[in-house]
Amino acid sequence: LRIASKSLVFQPDDVSASILKFPFRHIRSIGDVEEGGGFPVESEQFVQVATKTGTETRIVTPFTALKSKRAVNFHVHYANAMEYLQLIRQLRDTAAKSPEDAEVVVQRVLAQVTADVQFDVRGFGHREAPLLQSHMWVRRVKPLLAVRGMLQLSNEAVYFQPHPNFS
């Protein structure tokens, strides 16, 4: 489960299964955390992105917006489900706000969840030393894609670490 600023995105482990995207503006209810770390979500509409497998990766095909009610249960295994639920509810509430107000809330949430994130210097060579006291938040821009991450300089190279840790 990935929590985005405007939707929940479920990307199953099975690469042949479809990716499901639940836009916050179509989510009607989010239940409380149940025993076992799960919580229910009810949505009036969702986006299904069918996938097929390539040699080793998932190949995304055109998406389909499905206008049918869908109730799903998300189970959080490696984190605190209550913290996730608070974050999801906070972001869902922004869907009804103006774009400017929503951006303020999203930036506040982003600052909150990344406050403790540190640049991993284990990739530095044994003779390298960081030149910046702290990393800088930047975006690596590629055609049709901007990846948020951390930038650090050493006396030998420029380093970029995507955050979240995928690009």
Image (tube, rainbow, N blue to C red):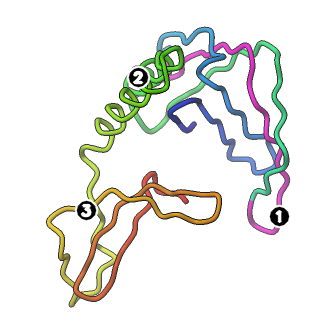
- What crowding class fits label 1: few (fewer than 14 Cα within 10 Å), some (14-19), or many (20 or more)? few
Magenta span: 35-57
Residue highlighted by disc 2: 101
Q: Is residue 38 magenta?
A: yes
The amino acid pointed to by label 3 is His
Distance, label 2 to label 1, CA atoms, is 41 Å
Of the numbered discs 2 and 3, the one sitting upstream in the chain is 2
Q: In this rendering, is residue 89 above or below 80?
A: above
**Residue position for label 3:** 135
Asked which secondary structure carries label 1, the reply is loop
**In front of the other: 56 or 146:** 146
> Which residue is found at the position 64% from the left and 25% from the top?
23
Q: Is residue 147 left or right of residue 52?
A: left
Q: Secondary structure at mark 2?
A: helix
**Disc 2 versus disc 3: distance between alpha carbons?**
28 Å
- Amino acid carrying label 2: it is Asp
Whether tag 1 and tag 3 are in contact, CB under 8 A, the answer is no
Q: Is residue 17 above or below residue 87?
A: below
Residue 24 counted in the magenta span: no
Tell me which amino acid carries mark 1.
Gly
Q: Residue furthest left?
A: 133
Q: Position of residue 31 (x, y in %)?
A: 53, 10
**In front: mark 1 or mark 3?**
3
**Tag 1 or tag 2, which sits nearer the N-term?**
1
Q: Residue at x 28, y 60 (%)?
A: 136
Give the residue pinned by disc 1: 54
The disc placed on residue 16 is: none
